[in-house]
């Protein structure tokens, strides 16, 4: 009998705590939705406000994130029905988090954000964001800003880095193109690219809710991460080169060590190393050291 009474008391305590936490969560989400109304000028009831985030339907946003997670072999993280979704996945050698960032401004803005982890030993710090001043003001207000010698890019962006020589080499034509494409997404030019010793962060203003746009955002951001990896590999004495191919015999698989007939061969999309399809699946990607590619092509 005493055990039953103790159990009932514990149940009541936990139940009261759960109810209190639920009420707090609901009040917090109503406040967050009211911020959304101020930012985007929407005038709706508090009931409907709890179903939106940054002007986007929260239920549809969750569906898009779930499909993105499925396509990237990732995992969704939904802590509450009224909170923004997150997706974690692996891109080559990096753990990546797709999330929505809310600014702490009096009138908050919402941003879609990707964060890539970077291997230890990365020494460079870089920040790139759109230019907000005319040329005369820039010279006066931002004397420490860098230019890379590309007039159009220098005119459009503020570039800050701890190594001017590195950033000029880092921002080659394909990387500049990826930054420009990110800048042009979602109908605004607000983009922040930030690199430090532990991560690459790409932050785009607006809540990107369409699956194709999320995948485009991830593809362009991944291209910038690829450029980081090239420099990291070079600094650590690793260089991915095209191996010579002897057309007189079948290539050998680095996983199982046997020959690969042409009709049963796939190639790493990045370093072109040949694999058996089964060996590629078994190894969960390319077998070449430090390559990290997860996708293959059937010919090149």
Image (cartoon, rainbow, N blue to C red):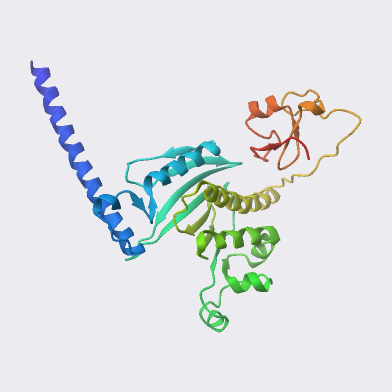
Q: Position of residue 159 (x, y in %)?
A: 58, 68
Q: Which residue is more in the foreground, 270 or 93?
A: 270
Placement of 275 over or under 165, stated as above or below: above
| Point 73% across, 23% down: residue | 256
Q: How many marks?
A: 0
Residue 25 placement, left or right of 271: left
List the single residue furthest toward the right: 248
Quadrant that contains the N terminus: top left
Q: Position of residue 44 (x, y in %)?
A: 28, 57
Residue 293 placement: quadrant: top right
Residue 154 placement, left or right of 105: right
Residue 163 placement: quadrant: bottom right
Quadrant that contains the C terminus: top right
Placement of 240 over or under 56, stated as above or below: above
Q: Which residue is more in the foreground, 25 or 158?
A: 25
Residue 228 placement, left or right of 112: right
Q: Is residue 178 visible?
A: yes
Q: Position of residue 216 (x, y in %)?
A: 57, 50
| Point 38% across, 56% down: residue | 55
Q: Position of residue 253 (x, y in %)?
A: 76, 28
Placement of 68 over or under 124, stated as above or below: above
Residue 300 placement, left or right of 96: right
Q: Which residue is more in the foreground, 54 or 76?
A: 54
| Point 68% across, 24% down: residue | 278
């Amino acid at each position: 009998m005493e055990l039953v009474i103790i159990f009932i008391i514990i149940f009541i305590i936990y139940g009261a705590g759960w109810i209190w936490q639920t009420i707090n969560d609901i009040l917090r989400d109503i406040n967050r939705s009211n911020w959304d109304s101020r930012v985007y000028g929407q005038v709706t009831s508090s009931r409907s406000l709890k179903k939106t985030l940054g002007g986007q339907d929260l239920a549809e946003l969750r569906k898009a994130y779930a499909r993105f997670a499925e396509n990237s072999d990732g995992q969704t993280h939904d802590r509450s029905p009224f909170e923004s979704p997150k997706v974690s996945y692996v891109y080559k050698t990096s753990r990546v988090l797709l999330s929505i960032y809310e600014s702490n401004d009096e009138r908050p803005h919402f941003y879609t954000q990707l964060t890539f982890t970077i291997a230890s030993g990365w020494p460079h710090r870089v920040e790139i964001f759109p230019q907000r001043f005319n040329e005369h003001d820039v010279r006066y207000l931002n004397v420490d800003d860098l230019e890379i010698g590309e007039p159009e890019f220098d005119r459009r962006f503020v570039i800050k880095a701890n190594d001017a020589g590195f950033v000029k080499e880092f921002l080659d034509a394909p990387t500049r193109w990826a930054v420009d494409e990110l800048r042009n997404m979602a109908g605004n030019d607000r983009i922040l690219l930030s690199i430090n010793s532990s991560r690459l962060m790409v932050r785009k203003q607006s809540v990107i809710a369409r699956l194709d746009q999320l995948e485009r955002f991830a593809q362009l951001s991944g291209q910038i991460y690829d450029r980081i990896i090239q420099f990291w590999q070079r600094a650590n004495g690793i260089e991915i080169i095209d191996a010579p191919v002897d057309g007189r015999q079948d290539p050998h698989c680095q996983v199982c060590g046997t020959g690969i007939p042409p009709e049963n061969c796939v190639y790493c999309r990045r370093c072109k190393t040949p694999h058996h399809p089964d060996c590629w699946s078994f190894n969960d990607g390319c077998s070449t050291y430090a390559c990290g590619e997860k996708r293959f092509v059937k010919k090149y």
